[in-house]
Image (tube, rainbow, N blue to C red):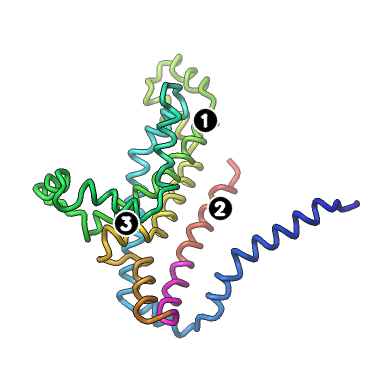
Amino acid sequence: MRISPFFIISLGLSVLVLAFITLPLAKMVLVTPISALILAFRDGEVIRAIGLSLFCALVASVLAFFFGTPLAYILARRKFKGKGLVESIVDLPIVIPHPVIGIAILSVVGQGTAMGTILSWLGVKIVGTATGIIAVLTFVGAPFYINAVKNAFEMVPARLERAARTMGASGFMAFFTVTFPLSLRSILSGFLMCSARAISEFGAVVVVAYHPMTAPVLIYERFESFGLKYSQPVAVLLIAVSLSIFIVLRIITSTKK
């Protein structure tokens, strides 16, 4: 079988792209001594930072699930004036520079603002707390969940819901017995994508809550204070965590229904 020049060029460009992505990460992993990784793994500050990142990302993903699923369903099933605007608003956190997101959140709930004062009366503190980190991570991660679930809902024929309704099921029952189960794999994928995006967030978090430090903030702090040698092992551990999430994601998306 004759191989076309187009295929050869495409293959060459694909190899370049994969090398561009893989080589920096692979080199960082390979040049980091095992002893340094062991020390980082035993470092309480490192474990706390990674644990905080995982915990806040999980909570952010749960919030995206509860509040984002209804919105994803409406966007998938309903046509209404201004729908394009709503979809654009959902995507905004993806394109806005993330330090701007942090500043925007502070402008709403920071000290001296009306909402910040109300939250303070209620005993809720945003700046410099895990609560603030969760708010930021939900902001940046929710679009990935909403878009993934919206696409999944669109793939489920609306006639299946209508058939369930004709058999006496309510709107809630039709959703939870038909659409939700058929979309479950994509919902899980969106949940993991939201978590992965949240774990990696730095720019918005460092504005709202430098302390307590998440893993990306700790990596930055160690790089600024001690240089590459001390930040690299923590970065490798975070790569391992992120890679584990995406392995799970690939397993979920590749499993046959």
Magenta: main secondary structure equals helix
Q: Percent from the top left, x then y, of residue 82? A: 41, 25
Sequence-wise first label, 2 or 3: 3
Report the Cα–Cα distance between label 1 and label 2. 22 Å
Q: Are marks 1 and 2 in contact (CB under 8 Å)?
A: no
Q: Residue at x 48, y 58 (%)?
A: 245
Type of amino acid at the residue the image marks with label 2? Ile
Q: Which residue is drawn at 41% across and 43% down?
A: 92
- Compared across the picture, whether 100 is left or right of 152 comes to left
Q: Percent from the top left, x then y, of residue 36? A: 44, 83
Q: Which residue range is magenta in the image?
A: 228-239
Type of amino acid at the residue the image marks with label 1? Glu
Position above or below: 108 against 216: above
**Which of 30 and 102 lies nearest the eye of the viewer?**
102
Q: Which residue is drawn at 36% across and 79% down?
A: 42
- The tag on residue 6 is none
Q: Kindly report which numbered mark, 2 or 3, lies closer to the viewer in this rendering.
A: 3
Q: Residues within 10 Å of mark 3 (few under 14, many from 20)?
A: many
Report the number of numbered marks.
3
Q: Mark 2 points at which residue?
A: 251
Helix, strand or loop under label 2 = helix
Q: Percent from the top left, x then y, of residue 117? A: 12, 47
Position above or below: 186 against 128: above
- Quadrant of the drawing holding the C terminus: top right
Q: Mark 1 points at which residue?
A: 154
Report the Cα–Cα distance between label 3 and label 1. 30 Å
Q: Residues within 10 Å of mark 2 (few under 14, many from 20)?
A: few
Q: Name the residue under label 3.
A: 56
Position above or below: 238 against 167: below
Q: Residue furthest right?
A: 1
Sequence-wise first label, 3 or 1: 3
